[in-house]
Image: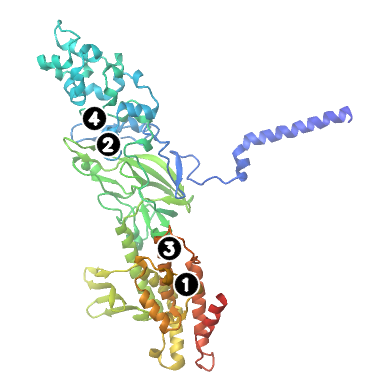
Amino acid sequence: MNPKNQLKYWMFAGFLSALFIHGWIQFNPNQWLSFLGNYPAQAEESEAIPLKNFNNAPIPDFEQITLGNLPPFETSGSAELPNGQTRSWNAGQNPSQIFTLGDFEAAFKLQKFDLNQIGQIAGIRIDVIKLSDFKLLETQNIQDLVKAMPQLLTKTLGEMPPIQEIVAQVLPPGWSPDRTLGEILSQNPQVQFTQLGQIDLSKYRLTQIPGIETVPLEAFNNWQSTPINGVPGLSRVPLSEFPNAPAPVGNMVALMDVPLQQIEQDRQKRVISGSQQEGFNVPCDKDCMHVELAQGGLQGALWIGKTQLVKGGFGPLGQLNSGKEPAGRHPFGDGFKVVVESVDEAKGTATLAMYFRICQRGMPDLGCSPYFLGPLPLMVVKEKPPIFVGSAAISTLESFRQTEALGLLNQILEKAKTDEIQVGDYLISRRRNLENGKGQLCLKKGDRELVKYPVQKTPQGLIKQVDKINLTQWDWQQIQFIYRNTKSLNALDTSLAGSVGNQDSLPFVSQIKVPLHPDLKKAWEYLNQHGWSANTQAGNDRIKATLEQSKGRLRVAEQQELYYKCLLHHQELMSAPNPIQLPSIQEVMKDLERWRKEAISAHYTPTQHQAINREKAADTQAEIAL
């Protein structure tokens, strides 16, 4: 290559390299590499605390979180306690400076720790800690120390330099350091009332009071008032190592559907937030910032935010903050409350925060304040990804189901344009007496009454009371099926009835039998030959009789019941060999419903209304499947 051209080549290459490096620095290498892999979507990019995934939802990583590395307080505040003390905190202050051992007595049980355990977990050497670092000792007198450590009575003063100095301040010269503490106290009882704080504790190491590192914190007098940072190393212990460590309560995860500032009035009954005092189904009628959840049993549930204040706390401390705390939940136990701090409808995000409380149990027992110490930022969650909500009370979920069931029953009648409809064994009816302002919604299954919901109109408004609601999971599934298919079932029954002019002689769609599904037939024959489990034998005689009477046919609902019986048998005998491999219930139902439709179509010709073998088509399809 010509030397002059070679020079131009290298100059051009250098120019391109410079542009590349400039772009790399300017636009952040993470943006360049983002297409190379998917990163787990937790919350926002800059998290308040370390997070990890639990059931695909972000939760605090308690293995990395300590009371010392919690986010600082975002606002300042103070509280006058019933015992005359004041608890105050400033924005930016670390929580370990404010919280005391007593605040977490029931929640975390930090009082069960001793200094040796703390040192091992936190990775600190006990033998280099000064007595002055253990703030608890400043208010202990000799009597308190002896109650916590009776073995000190047999130690000589010379073995305990700090105690020796205290005795020297109280007694006149002439005593020997070789005397035991027990001997000194028996002859000079006034020594026992001398506090350790009267001497300079920074001159002594912790181990110069022999055995103090193995004494549980709760053995010391007034341990509850000791700040977290007054116990050496405690603020460095991961929350996962606490005697009663915070952990997910339950495993319920939902999707955050949408964050909103206001609430629709007809959605009040689906609230899952509140307090331990009022429960976690507290309606909100104004300033109802919230997030709406989706998925599973929490579909449409509302988690109200901090704008709603609810009753909290108990005992004398329960009067702090006017006895109120922001609405929220306790997905990780009683240590702190999780609150929806703010929502951004435009961005589709919600900010979650932690709120803590003040507790003072023991003697005197002042109870606990509402959860109002906060907010401490927790995380930002986005629209659509999963959010962990903890365990939802069975009563709350049942109230959701009750409301939904009543709504479905009423909508079934509305869709069918009637006040009474029967599908299979289920009879749904609605009675209304406009003259006396009474009404009643009922659901019966055969002779059994499953739902009874009377309504009475009064000058003060409607009186609504559910007298009875007793729905099994099976009943619930059938109601949902009827609701989804009400129009088609109603139209089909009407057309069939019109074809022959005698509705009473025709079965409802749900009563039409189709051949036993081939996979269910194999399972049925195998289990009849080799034996059913104890919990799955019930009802087999009825199924067997029906199959014999109808020449191997069952209703779709009966076959669905049989499917779950076979599945339950397998689950109860997991350790036993299982040659029966059932397809999914969706596949089985798809086949059965298709055969039923074909049986209906084959029952009448479109023009002549002539009856033919209504089961021929279903038989053919079953044979093909076999």
Instruction: Look at mark 3 in the image and give the residue it sits on.
Output: 570
- Marks 3 and 2: in contact by CB < 8 Å? no
- Marks 4 and 1: in contact by CB < 8 Å? no
Where does residue 197 sit, x and y in percent of width and height? 23, 18
Where does residue 354 sit, x and y in percent of width and height? 36, 42
Q: Is residue 109 above or below residue 157?
A: below
Q: Is residue 32 left or right of residue 609?
A: right
Between 124 and 26, the one lying in front of the other is: 124
Where does residue 93 sit, x and y in percent of width and height? 36, 31
Q: Is residue 499 above or below residue 419?
A: below
Instruction: Look at mark 1 in the image and give the residue it sits on.
Output: 520
Mark 1 vs mark 3, CA separation in Å: 13 Å
Q: Quadrant of residue 271?
A: bottom left
Given the image, on which type of amino acid does mark 1 rest?
Answer: Leu
Mark 1 vs mark 4, CA separation in Å: 66 Å
Mark 2 vs mark 4, CA separation in Å: 11 Å
Between 427 and 461, the one lying in front of the other is: 427
**Nearer the viewer's eye, disc 2 or disc 4?**
4
Identify the mark nearer the N-term, 2 or 4.
Answer: 2
Identify the mark nearer the N-term, 4 or 3.
Answer: 4
Given the image, on which type of amino acid does mark 3 rest?
Answer: His
Identify the mark nearer the N-term, 1 or 3.
Answer: 1
Say which element carries label 1: helix
Say which element carries label 2: helix
Given the image, on which type of amino acid does mark 4 rest?
Answer: Trp
| Crowdedness near tag 3: few (<14), some (14–19) or many (≥20) residues, C-alpha within 10 Å | some
